[in-house]
Image: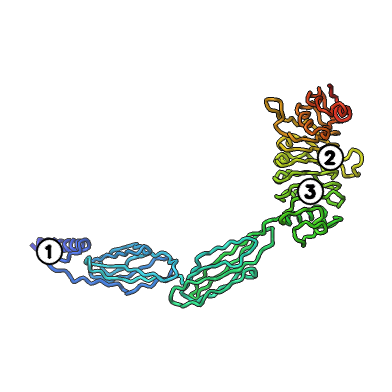
Amino acid sequence: MIRNNRMYSCRQGLWGIICCLSLLMGMASCQDFTDDTGRTMPEPDLKFADGTLNLPLEEKEYTVDIESNLPWRVKTSATWIDLLSSNGMGTGSFRISVSKNANVAPREAEIAGWIIEGAETKLKVVQEGVGIALKKRAVKVGAEGSAEEVIPFSTMVTYTYELSEGCDWIHVTDGAAITPGVINESELKLAIDPYTDIDEGRTASLYLKGSNGITDVLTITQDKKPLGDIDYLRMFYESANGDNWTKKWNFDAPLETNPTNWFGLKFENKRVVEIDIQSPNNIEGDIIPLCNLSELRSIKFKHQKLAGIPEEIGQLSQLTTLWIIESAASGNLPESLGECELLTSFNISNHPTSTPVGFNNTFTGNLDMLINIPGMVTIKAYCNNLSGPLPVIPLDGNNKPTTWKSLKEFMIYTNGFSGSIPYGYGTVIEKSGSTGIFRVNDNQLSGQIPVDIKAWSQYATRKAAWIMQGNSLTE
């Protein structure tokens, strides 16, 4: 019996524990504080350990203490608060995570806790704001500078500002006085000096410092000075023996036509449009920098010492005249010459007998790229080292030239051209009448002279010296 009574007592105690656990679980889900027998549970008592939770502005996780005699839950509608846990069985805690507050002003929210729904206890959450913030954090200006760059910002605190160490090209005008504790909309004004460096830009920082210890940073970037005509002229001058020129350029002078300051140059609206230096001036170098003078229409050099015609010549879309005469130039003629579509006059010749010693051009290659230039009037390339066949003039269905229709002078004598004379030259040269010139003597031409050349009005008097001499041509 004792044993049975003990067993009965144990069963009765176990049943009581089970009933109690079931009751607690029911309260956690239904928040109903009566059991099946109608007994009343303790009066709900829930409160947060603190009435207000004051947080710094940084993103962080926190533990919030809560006191309760029954199971509880918490919730919030704030998007910047994430509840990492949201319920418990009694006095305990829950975890929250808050995002960084990028606003100038503090922000507030509530966390509600309850045992019986509809009877919530509120916890006020206040997160500190940054107190001061720029409305833009980067400014980019051109080399010409800026008289007034407006930099708006908001602040609830007093502030100071400073520039990067050694920065003397930015000048700051302060904003209006502010009232601490409320949001002030203010601005700084920056004046940025012009920049004359052509090699690289420059960067500085402006530090806006709030009295609350928060600093916001504005980055100011200024472009390098874009290269202009004067820069390309200087590049050419410095690389082409400028210090030893007979007539020098004055880079302190305005960009306007003046033979004293700018020997050989013609300007329009401060842009170089013509270069004409045909008397000895000790110029020695490459004309590549001049190929960046985008308004340049005419280049004429004679009795200088130039490296040749660079591939960059094709950049000169306005070029109509290119003369490199008796200037010790050499190298293959570049294919990019064909991109100078407005070119009408091309002269790279040497005088047959009187070119000064050391000034003979020795160009190589051929003239095929010039066929791409429809308006050619004059081609003079005599007394060089050119070779290959003569350019073939395209013809239409009636055997009429479709390009070089205005060709007046074709002078390529004393070179190494070979092959036959293509049909078409006589047709275009004839249009020039007695002023037309077709000189191909002293090459390696062969074959029969085309009928349009023989029909040229000047053929009979010019054929011996200008066509047949020094070639293996037949009529």
Q: Which residue is mark 1?
A: 9
Q: Which residue is mark 2?
A: 349
Residue 390, picture quadrant: top right
Residue 4, image x, y percentages: 9, 60
Q: What's the residue type where badge 2 is placed? A: Ser
Q: How is the image coloured?
A: rainbow
Mark whose residue sits in front, 1 or 2: 2
Image: 249 above or below 462: below
Image: 192 above or below 435: below
Q: What's the residue type where badge 1 is placed? A: Ser
Q: Quadrant of the N terminus?
A: bottom left
Q: Are marks 3 and 1 in contact (CB under 8 Å)?
A: no
Residue 331, image x, y percentages: 79, 40
Q: Quadrant of the C terminus?
A: top right
Which residue is drawn at the image coordinates 45% and 66% (left, top)? 102
Residue 140, picture quadrant: bottom right
Give the crowd class for mark 1: few <14, some 14-19, many >=20 residues within 10 Å: few
The label number, if any, that marks residue 286 in the structure image? 3
SS at mark 3 in the image: loop
Residue 41, picture quadrant: bottom left
Q: Earlier in the sequence, mark 2 or mark 3?
A: 3
SS at mark 2 in the image: loop
Which residue is drawn at the image coordinates 55% and 63% (left, top)? 138
Residue 474, image x, y percentages: 84, 22
Mark whose residue sits in front, 2 or 3: 2
Which residue is drawn at the image coordinates 29% and 70% (left, top)? 122
Q: Alpha carbon of mark 3 to alpha carbon of mark 1: how far?
A: 114 Å
Image: 376 above or below 286: above
Q: Alpha carbon of mark 1 to alpha carbon of mark 2: how far?
A: 129 Å
Residue 145, image x, y percentages: 63, 64
